[in-house]
Structure formats: C-alpha cells, structure tokens
Amino acid sequence: MSINTPKEVIESAVKVGINKIDLSSGNYGKFAVLSMLAGVYIAFGGILSLVIGFGFPEITANNPSLQKLLSGCMFPIGLILVVILGAELFTGNNALLIPAYMKKHYGMWPILKNWGLVYFGNLVGALAFTYFLVYQCGLTASDPYHSAIIKVAEAKVSMSWGMVFLKGIGANWCVCLAVWLALSSRSFVGKMLGCWLPVMAFVALGYEHSIANMFFIPLGMMEGANIDIMHAINTSFVPATLGNIVGGALFVGCAYGYINLTKK
C-alpha cells in the first residue's frame, strides 16, 4: 500500500486549508451544506456507537472495556464519511487550516471565521439528524438505549471544567491524527483505516469531542436527562471546544507544520 511522505502530507494540508478558506469566504451555500452534512455524519456515528455499544448489556455488564470497544469500533463511520465524501468538520479544520496559515497564505481572522461558521453548521446538522432521524424514529425510546443515553449525557455534564478541557485535547488530537493518516494514504481502504484507528481509540478512552456532544447531550435531554442547557454549555461544550482547538491546531497542525515546513 503506497503512502504519501510527511512532506507530501503537509503540502496536501496546505492546499486543503487554502481551499477551505476560499470556500468559507465566498460560496456560502455550498459551505453551509457541507458543514451541516458533517454534523449529520458525526451524529450518525454517534447513534450507531450507542446502539451497538450498549446493545449487549448481558455481555458488557461484567466487561466494561467491551462496551467501550464496541462503541469505539462503530463511531468512526462519521469521520470516514466526512473525509471520503467531503464535508466541513470543525474539529478537522482546527488542524487543516494551520499549515497554510504558517506559510502566510491568510491571517488569523479567516481561520476564526471558518471555525465559527463550521461550528454552527455542524450544530444545525447534528441537531436536525438527532431530532428527526433518532428521537422521532424512536431509536432510543426503549431500554437499554433510553437509559444509556440519559446516563451518557448526564455524565458528560458532571465532570469538572478542567477535566473536560483535557479530554477535549485528547479527542481532537486523535481525530486530527486520523485526518493526517487519511492524507497520507492514496487508497480508499487506507483512508478508511487511517480514520478508523485513532477515532476508535479516543471513543474507547472516553475523550470529549465537541461535535459528538452535539448529538449525545441533546439526545439525552430529549429522552429526559436532568440537564440544564446553560450548565451543559459552560461545563461541557465550552471546555471541550477549547480543548479540541488545542488538540487539533497546536498538537497536530502546528506540530507537523513546524516539523515539515520549517527550513533547515
């Protein structure tokens, strides 16, 4: 299986970053659709991970790692769809926009604008999918899924701000490493495997992904979880989002940009 070199990967990331900034600076209709699709794809991975991961309570009750493994194995379909079919995902863009910025193709304002618009589009797509194709379809109306999503959602808003921030770093470090691995492959299978392994790892480890939480927490609230929306924003979404930015932009985009773009 042929792969691209680290130098070729960073050059691809520069081109991708330029294209993403151009898209978010002009073609707002296409950009909006691609952003909403990414939210839908991540939510799709979320419900699949919930149904499969919590669908065997008799087996996983005494094997907690098995439940995490099953959920982790299912969730990556969201990022695979984003990468293979093309979509605008906030967490992936955290890293992909940095190399071209380091080469001074654009400034910080276009990056912040892109991130803000993509984040909103991801939210709209995730909420729409969650409400119409999960909640209204009754996919989590009965146990074990009903109890599971309530437990998952309430757990996500019960952690300390600092813990969620650190878990946010871990989640998007993994996600953006998955994007980098996908860029390194020239084959369909290679790109899928590149997306699958790191994302499976972050789910199994319990890290916090801000866009995935746009599915898990709202669905938990729809099913009756005792969650206040402002509390969820302050204790989950804000620290997870900031942690995701650090994990993607600093630990992947800046790190590999420095390694492969800096002249000797």
Image (cartoon, rainbow, N blue to C red):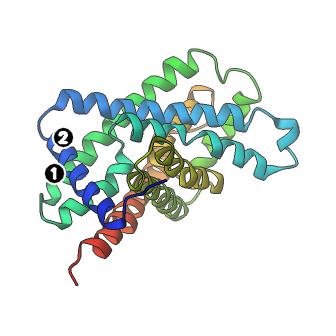
Q: Residue furthest front?
A: 1
Labels 2 and 1: the sequence-earlier one: 2
Query: In front: 137, or 183?
Result: 183
Q: Does the rendering let one see residue 214?
A: no
Place of residue 183 in the rendered image (x, y in percent of width and height, measured from the top left): 38, 53
Q: Whole-percent x and y of residue 181? A: 44, 56
Given contact means CB atoms under 8 Å apart, are the residues at marks 2 and 1 in contact? yes
Front residue of 232 and 168 = 168
| Residue at 51 percent of width and 26 percent of height | 130
- Image height check: is 162 above or below 189? below
The amino acid type of the residue labelled 2 equals Ser
Image-based side of 63 in relation to 103, left or right: right
The quadrant of the rendering that contains the C terminus is bottom left
Q: Which residue is mark 1?
A: 110
Residue for badge 2: 24
Side of 196 where 114 appears, left or right: left
Q: Position of residue 176 (x, y in %)?
A: 42, 56
The x and y percentages for residue 43 are 50, 33
